[in-house]
Image (cartoon, rainbow, N blue to C red):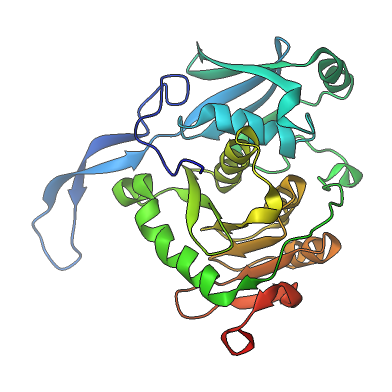
Amino acid sequence: MLPSERNDLNDSDTPAPTSRRVPTLVVAYDDPMAREGHRDLAVEMPVNLVYGSVPYAVMMTTPSDLVDFAYGFSLTEGIVESADEIRSVQVEDGDGGLRLMVDLAPGRLREHLARKRAISGRTGCGVCGIDDLAALPKAEPRAHAMQAVGIESIQRALLEMGDAQLLNHTTRAVHAAAWADPGGNLLAVREDVGRHNGLDKLIGALMRERTDPREGFVVITSRCSFEMVEKAATFGAAVLVAISAPTSLAIERARLHDMTLCAIARSDTLTVFTGRERLLLAAER
């Protein structure tokens, strides 16, 4: 079983605090007296991904589950095709941030250096550094043999998401991505200030555990843009559930990858945009 959101991470996964308490002054519009207090904020810091001593990207991220992030980012960026092509990941202090030193298998490193592009990321920016429309990310088609998912399983996963978001309980400022089994039980949750980063961390955790993408589905708490669909498709997920609405391009990409895309998902209703055939409604069960 995969670990859920963890509090006992080792130093290589969480080298810095993920939240920070700051003083505040709360002012009411109809009250002349301000109220002093404190609030926990999510930590955001630059993380430089380095392959073979060559810097590749700077992403703004929450400093947790960074090894998972390196694995997931490497897959969804097309740098690797499997976890076996990453030999190790080391987290180092950098100038004003952190460095993820990713050691690739020799053949994969040569291929990566031949196609290297440098990106400077905002918080989980999906296409920074792309200078040609043809270079937009596009996952390779994967065969989906996943069995149909009952609508009550998705509801169960959504209900579990609230308690599973530990950092968001404290800060109210981060996104989450989760992996649920066919019964809707959450097996892994990752959080980050960037929605793309949160999904990359989740995918990295699943890669490291050799999780079969046919044995569950992905739930995200953010809006569903095309990058989120592409990342899920790169991993091989057949079902993606988003709490917020999708974009038009996200729906187009979901159709392209033969994915089931459900969004505007609440505890009582959800909207199916693509892949209706994979869902079992209550009446059909």
Task: Name the residue: 11% across, 64% down.
Answer: 31
Task: Name the residue: 55% across, 25% down.
Answer: 47
Q: Is residue 130 left or right of residue 197?
A: right
Task: State the residue lying farthest toward the left.
Answer: 33
Task: State the residue lying farthest toward the bottom.
Answer: 283
The quadrant in which the C terminus is found is bottom right
Q: Is residue 178 left or right of residue 84?
A: left
Is residue 108 shown above or below 122?
above
Which of 239 and 168 lies nearest the eye of the viewer?
Answer: 239
Task: Name the residue: 75% across, 76% down.
Answer: 277
Instruction: Please tell me in which quadrant of the rendered image residue 135 appears.
Output: top right
The percent position of residue 185, horizontal first and vertical second, equals 48, 59
Is residue 271 shown above or below 215?
below
Task: Name the residue: 41% across, 22% down.
Answer: 10
Residue 191 at least partly seen:
yes
Residue 123 at least partly seen:
no
The percent position of residue 49, horizontal first and vertical second, equals 64, 22
The percent position of residue 165, horizontal first and vertical second, equals 39, 51
Instruction: Please tell me in which quadrant of the rendered image residue 194 appears.
Output: top right
The percent position of residue 54, horizontal first and vertical second, equals 73, 13
Is residue 16 shown above or below 161?
above
Which of 147 and 200 lies nearest the eye of the viewer?
Answer: 147
Which of 257 and 53 lies nearest the eye of the viewer?
Answer: 257
Q: How many marks?
A: 0
